[in-house]
Amino acid sequence: MWLWDFLFGSWRERAAAPPRAEPCAAPAVCADPPADPLPDDLELLTEEPAPWWVPAEEPMLAPPCAEPEAGPVEAALAGFVEGAVCRNEIEVPALPRVAARALAMLRNDEVDFGQLAEVVCEDPALAARVLQLVNSAAFARMFKVDRLETAFAWLGCKKLRSAVLAVSLKTMLLGHSGSGRALSEEIWQHSIICAALLSYASERFGLSENEAFLSGLLHDIGKLVIVRLAETFQQSQRQRVPPATFRRLCEEWHEPLGHMIAAAWQLQSPLPEIIGEHHAPLREDDPLARQRALVQFANTCCALLGYSGDAPCDFFNLPSARVLGLTDDPATQKWLAKIPALVAEKTGLF
C-alpha cells in the first residue's frame, strides 16, 4: 500500500482541497512587451559540441620538433638518472609480497583456489578489492559473493591476475605521501584509463581482453623508477623537480626501465616487448604492430579526453589509426562515442 499512497496520495490531497480563486486580469499597463525576434544565429547557440576526438585546437600529426633548452635542474637530474642506469644502480620496484606469491601461484591454471585464498587473506586490502570487483555491476550478479574461493572461481585465473596487478600497481603508486605523490596519481590515472580503453577495444581488434587490459595498465611502469629517482634527487640535492622536467625524463627512460621491471616481475610475453617499445614506429613486418598501435591509440584518447597535456592531433590520420583501420565513418564514430562513459564506469572498479 505504501507505493499506492506514494503515487496517488498527493493527487487525493489536491482533489480534496478547495478550489483556488482565479487571479484577476492584469491591468493593461503591466502587459509584457512583445518578445524580441529570435536572433539569426540561433542555430549557432543550439549547435551540438564537436565529438571528443575532434581537437579544439589546430591538430597536428606529431609534436613540435623544437625542444626547450634544459635548465640546470633538468640537466643535473638527467645526469643523475643516466648515471644510475649506467652503473646498474637501479632498484627495481618489487611487487607487494602477497601479490607476488599470488601471481606465482596463478601461473598454474590449475591452482588450488583454497590455498590461494589463504595467501590473499594475508593482505586484507587486496582481498577486499577482489570481492568488491566480483560484486560490482560489471558482473551483474544476483547474489553477493563473500568468499574468496567463490570470487576466484567467478573471475578465473586470467582476470584474477589482472586484478592483482591492478591493485598492486595502485598501491605502489599511491601508497606513499612523498614529494612524488602528485606525479604518481597522474601515472595511475593514465594507466587505469588506458587499461579500460584497451579492454574495450580488444574485441573489435581480435585480441585477448586480459592481455590488452594489462598492456594498457602496465605500459608506463618504468615511470615508477623515475618517480623514485626524482624523489631521491630532491632529497639529496635539495632542488625541486618541476613536473615538466619529470615528464621529459619519462619520455626518454620509461620504456627501457619498464622492460627491466617486466623482466623482474616475470610478466609473460608479449607484455615485456610491448612495455619496452610501445612508442616505437609501427612497421608492417612487426608481429606486435597491432598491440603497439592500440597502446598509442589509448595514449591519444587520453590526450583528447583531457586526461593529459599532449598536443592535439589529427586522430584518423595518425599511424596508430591507420594500422588499426580506424576511419571517420558512422560505425566508428558510434564506437568511439561510447568511450567517455566506459572510462568513467571501468576506472571506478579499482
Image (cartoon, rainbow, N blue to C red):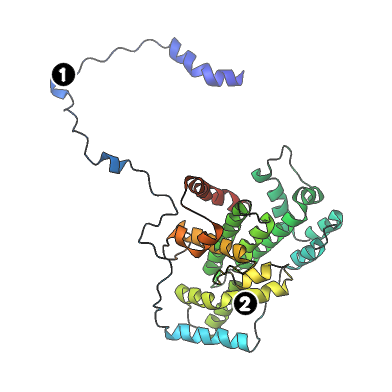
Q: Earlier in the sequence, mark 1 or mark 2?
A: 1
Place of residue 55 in the rendered image (x, y in percent of width and height, measured from the top left): 40, 57
Camera-side residue of 183 and 266: 266
Place of residue 110 in the rendered image (x, y in percent of width and height, measured from the top left): 85, 57
The amino acid sitting under disc 1 is Pro
Q: Is residue 13 left or right of residue 279?
A: left
Residue 304 seen anywhere in this rendered image of the structure = yes
The residue indicated by pointer 2 is 257
The residue indicated by pointer 1 is 27
Q: Which residue is at 78% across, 52% downward?
A: 152
Task: Name the front one of labels 1 and 2.
Answer: 2
Q: Which residue is at 48% across, 53% downward?
A: 327
Above-or-below relation of 259 to 238: above
Query: Quadrant location of residue 235?
Result: bottom right
Decide: few, some or many residues near mark 2? Use Cα within 10 Å; few <14, some 14-19, many ≥20.
many
Residue 93 seen anywhere in this rendered image of the structure = no
